Image: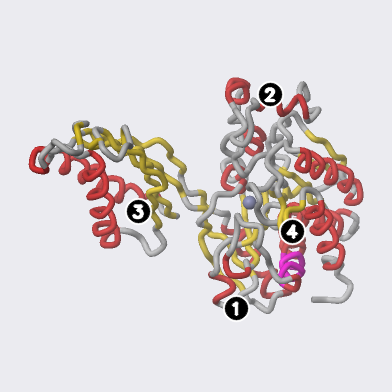
Amino acid sequence: MPDNRLSADGTRVLADLNALRAIGAYKTGVHKPTFSEPHVRSLQWLAQKLPEAGLAAEIDGIGNVLGTSTKAGAKLLAGSHLESQNYAGWLDGSLGVIYALEAARVLNSDPAIKGAVEVASWCDEEGHFGSFLGSRSYVGTVNEAEIDAARDRNADRSMRQALQSSGLAGRPRRLAEAGRHIGYLEAHIEQGETLESGKLKIGIVTSIVGIWQYRITFTGEQNHAGTTKMAIRKDAGLALARFCVAIDETFPKICGPRTVWTTGRITLDPGAPSIIPGGAEMLFQIRDAEAAVIARLEGRLREMATEATAKGPCSVAFERIRTGAPAMMNAAFQDAIEAASADVAGGKSLRMPSGAGHDAQVLSTIMPAGMLFVPSIGGVSHHWTENTDDADIVTGAEVFVETCRRLLQAAATR
Ligand SMILES: [Zn+2]
C-alpha cells in the first residue's frame, strides 16, 4: 500500500470495541437486549462519536442510529447493529459498526476522496422484538401496526413502551433516500470456523442464505397409555419421530453442498407420560443460498407428508410459516473486497455464503450490498466466549477501510 494513503487506526478500533464491551459487560461478552439500558447507552455512545467522522448523528423513532454527511460526492452506507443476544459476545454487531465509524473517520476527512462513508446502526437485528425491524423500517417495509404489535421476548412490555422508556417515542423513523447511496457495506464476525480452519483473514460474502420455516402437524388419537393395545394406537408423537428420521435419510441425497436443516422444537399434545399423544407438532427450518435447492427440498417434504398421511395411522399437515429468499451480494462489492484483501491482507480471502441472517440482506433489496467476515475463534458465537484475535480485528478494519475507499473512488470516476 502506498505510504501516503491514510488507513485504519487499529489501536483506535480496538479501544472503541472495548468501550462498547464495557457497556453492559457480562464476563468477557455483553448482555444488551434491544432497548435495555446498556443498549440505549450504546446507541448514545455511537451518536456522540459520529461527529468525529464529520457526520451529523440522529437516533430515529425505531432506534436506528444514522450518521449523515454533507460532503459532496458519492455516499456509501456502512454499519451493523449494537444490541446483542442475551449473555452473548462482544463483537457480534459492534465490530461492523466500529469498522464503519473507522472508515468514516479515515475517509471523510480525506480531500482525495470525493465522497463519504455514512454510518448506520440498525435496531433489533437480533430479533428481541421482531425480525430486522430497524433495517426494514429504513427500507420502508415496517408499518405502524407492526410496531404496535411487537413485544419484548425478554420482558413483559410492548415495543411502544420500550420506545417510550428509551426516550424515542414520537421521533420520526428515517427512510432511505432514493439514489442517495451507492450501496451498503457491512462487516461481521463469521460465526463459523471456515476462515479459521483455512488460515484465512477475510470472508467475501457471496450471498446470505434463505431461511424457510415450516410447521408440520401430526394428528392421531389421544388415549390411555396403559389400556390401549399397541396394534390399534394412533400415536402422533411416534409418527413425528419417524418423519424426522425419514428427513435425515432423504435430504442428504437431494440437498446442496451447504444446505442445513433443523427441527428446532417438538411439542406433544397433551404431553404427559401416561397419555398417548393425539397431536404432535414440529418446527422445521431449511437454510440454503439457492432458492432452487430449498424449493426442491420443500417439494420432497410435501410428498413425504402426503405419503405418511396415506400410509397412516396418523395424518400429517404441512404449512410454510416463513419464507426468506436468499440475498445475493453485489458482484462489484465482492470484487472490491477481494482487491482490498489482496492489497492489505495478503490475499488471504475466500468467497463464501453466509449461513446467518444479517441486515445486509434487507438493505440489498433497495441498493447494491456487500459483506465481509473476519474469523471467529473456534467458530463460537451467540455466547459470551465469542472472540476474534486482535490482529485479525485490525486486519479486518484495514480491509474494510480500503474496500470503502475503492468503492467511493470507483463511483467518483463513473
Ligand atoms: Zn450480528
User: Mark 2 near mark 4, Cβ–Cβ under 8 Å?
Assistant: no
Quick one: label 1 or label 3, which is nearer the N terminus? 1
* x and y percentages locating residue 188 in the rendered image: 65, 58
- Crowding at mark 4 (Cα within 10 Å: few <14, some 14-19, many 20+): many
**Is residue 255 positioned above or below 393 on the image?**
above
Quick one: label 2 or label 4, which is nearer the N terminus? 2
Residue shown at the point (63%, 63%) measured from the top left: 373
Q: Which residue is mark 3?
A: 293
Q: Which residue is mark 1?
A: 199
Q: Which residue is mark 4?
A: 404
Residue shown at the point (48%, 52%) measured from the top left: 209
Disc 4/disc 3 C-alpha distance (Å): 33 Å
* x and y percentages locating residue 155 in the rendered image: 64, 32
Q: Is residue 5 left or right of residue 169?
A: right
Task: Point out the stretch of residues depicted in magenta.
Answer: 392-399
Q: Amino acid at mark 1?
A: Lys
Disc 1/disc 4 C-alpha distance (Å): 24 Å
Between residue 84 and residue 111, name the one nearer to us: 84
For the stretch drawn in magenta, what is the main secondary structure?
A: helix
